Amino acid sequence: MTGPAHEAPGPVGVIVSVDPDRFADVVRAASGAGLTVTGEQPLLGFLTGTIAEDRIPVLEAVDGVEAVDRERIMGIPPPDSPLQ
Protein backbone atom coordinates (compact mmCIF):
# COMPACT_ATOMS: atom_id res chain seq x y z
CA MET A 1 0.00 0.00 0.00
CA THR A 2 1.31 3.46 -0.85
CA GLY A 3 0.29 6.97 0.07
CA PRO A 4 1.13 9.70 2.55
CA ALA A 5 0.64 7.48 5.59
CA HIS A 6 3.38 5.14 4.36
CA GLU A 7 5.94 7.70 3.19
CA ALA A 8 9.03 8.35 5.27
CA PRO A 9 8.88 11.69 7.09
CA GLY A 10 11.01 14.45 5.66
CA PRO A 11 14.12 15.75 7.37
CA VAL A 12 13.80 18.04 10.36
CA GLY A 13 16.03 20.96 11.24
CA VAL A 14 18.20 20.50 14.31
CA ILE A 15 20.70 22.46 16.36
CA VAL A 16 23.44 20.26 17.78
CA SER A 17 25.61 21.23 20.75
CA VAL A 18 28.99 19.52 20.56
CA ASP A 19 32.27 19.31 22.45
CA PRO A 20 34.21 22.29 20.97
CA ASP A 21 37.56 20.58 21.63
CA ARG A 22 36.62 17.76 19.25
CA PHE A 23 34.47 19.75 16.86
CA ALA A 24 35.78 18.41 13.53
CA ASP A 25 35.64 14.77 14.67
CA VAL A 26 32.11 15.19 16.01
CA VAL A 27 30.95 16.84 12.77
CA ARG A 28 32.28 13.86 10.77
CA ALA A 29 30.61 11.37 13.13
CA ALA A 30 27.32 13.31 13.07
CA SER A 31 27.40 13.32 9.27
CA GLY A 32 27.95 9.57 9.39
CA ALA A 33 24.86 9.27 11.59
CA GLY A 34 22.77 10.94 8.89
CA LEU A 35 23.07 14.66 9.64
CA THR A 36 23.28 16.99 6.65
CA VAL A 37 25.28 19.89 8.08
CA THR A 38 24.04 23.33 7.02
CA GLY A 39 26.03 25.52 9.41
CA GLU A 40 29.01 25.30 11.75
CA GLN A 41 30.02 27.45 14.74
CA PRO A 42 33.15 25.71 16.06
CA LEU A 43 34.07 28.44 18.56
CA LEU A 44 30.61 28.28 20.10
CA GLY A 45 30.40 24.49 19.91
CA PHE A 46 27.28 24.03 17.83
CA LEU A 47 26.20 23.16 14.34
CA THR A 48 22.93 23.14 12.46
CA GLY A 49 21.58 20.70 9.96
CA THR A 50 18.79 18.43 8.85
CA ILE A 51 18.21 14.78 9.66
CA ALA A 52 15.42 12.24 9.33
CA GLU A 53 13.26 12.23 12.46
CA ASP A 54 13.95 8.54 13.10
CA ARG A 55 17.75 9.16 13.03
CA ILE A 56 17.72 11.70 15.89
CA PRO A 57 18.37 9.03 18.57
CA VAL A 58 21.40 7.85 16.56
CA LEU A 59 22.68 11.44 16.37
CA GLU A 60 22.15 11.93 20.11
CA ALA A 61 24.28 8.83 20.75
CA VAL A 62 27.30 10.18 18.82
CA ASP A 63 30.28 10.59 21.15
CA GLY A 64 30.85 14.33 21.65
CA VAL A 65 27.24 15.36 20.94
CA GLU A 66 25.97 17.10 24.07
CA ALA A 67 22.42 17.97 22.97
CA VAL A 68 20.14 17.86 19.95
CA ASP A 69 17.28 20.36 19.72
CA ARG A 70 14.73 20.66 16.94
CA GLU A 71 14.67 24.03 15.23
CA ARG A 72 11.56 26.01 15.93
CA ILE A 73 10.26 28.41 13.32
CA MET A 74 8.51 31.43 14.72
CA GLY A 75 6.34 33.62 12.60
CA ILE A 76 5.04 37.08 13.20
CA PRO A 77 1.52 38.01 12.23
CA PRO A 78 0.95 40.38 9.31
CA PRO A 79 0.74 44.10 10.18
CA ASP A 80 -3.04 44.18 9.83
CA SER A 81 -3.57 41.18 12.11
CA PRO A 82 -5.51 41.72 15.38
CA LEU A 83 -2.77 39.75 17.20
CA GLN A 84 -0.12 42.43 17.62
Image (cartoon, rainbow, N blue to C red):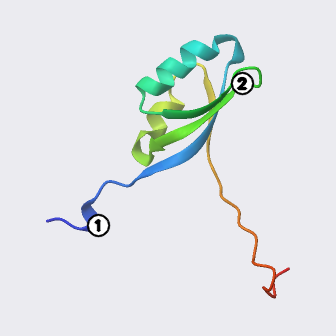
Residue at the image point whose x is 47% and y is 37% from the top: 57
Q: Quadrant of residue 76?
A: bottom right
Tag 2 and tag 1, C-beta contact below 8 Å: no
Q: Secondary structure at mark 2?
A: loop
- From the top left corner, tell me how far across and down residue 82 is, in percent: 81, 88
Does residue 63 appear in the picture of this structure?
Answer: no
- Gap between marks 2 and 1, in whole Å? 37 Å
Task: Tell me the element at label 1.
Answer: helix
Q: Nearer the viewer, residue 11 or 57?
A: 11
Q: Residue at x 66, y 58 (%)?
A: 73
Give the image location of residue 83, x and y in percent. Answer: 81, 83
Q: Which residue is depicted at the point 42% across and 32% down?
A: 34
Crowd band around label 2 with a 10 angstrom C-alpha radius: few (<14), some (14–19), many (20+) = some
75 over 45 or under it: above or below: below
User: Which residue is under mark 1?
Assistant: 5
Q: Judge from the rendering whether residue 40 lies leftward or rightward of residue 34; answer left or right.
A: right
Provide the residue designation for mark 2.
Answer: 45
Percent from the top left, x then y, of residue 31?
Answer: 46, 26
1 above or below 30?
below
The N terminus is located in which quarter?
bottom left
* Dot 2 amino acid type: Gly
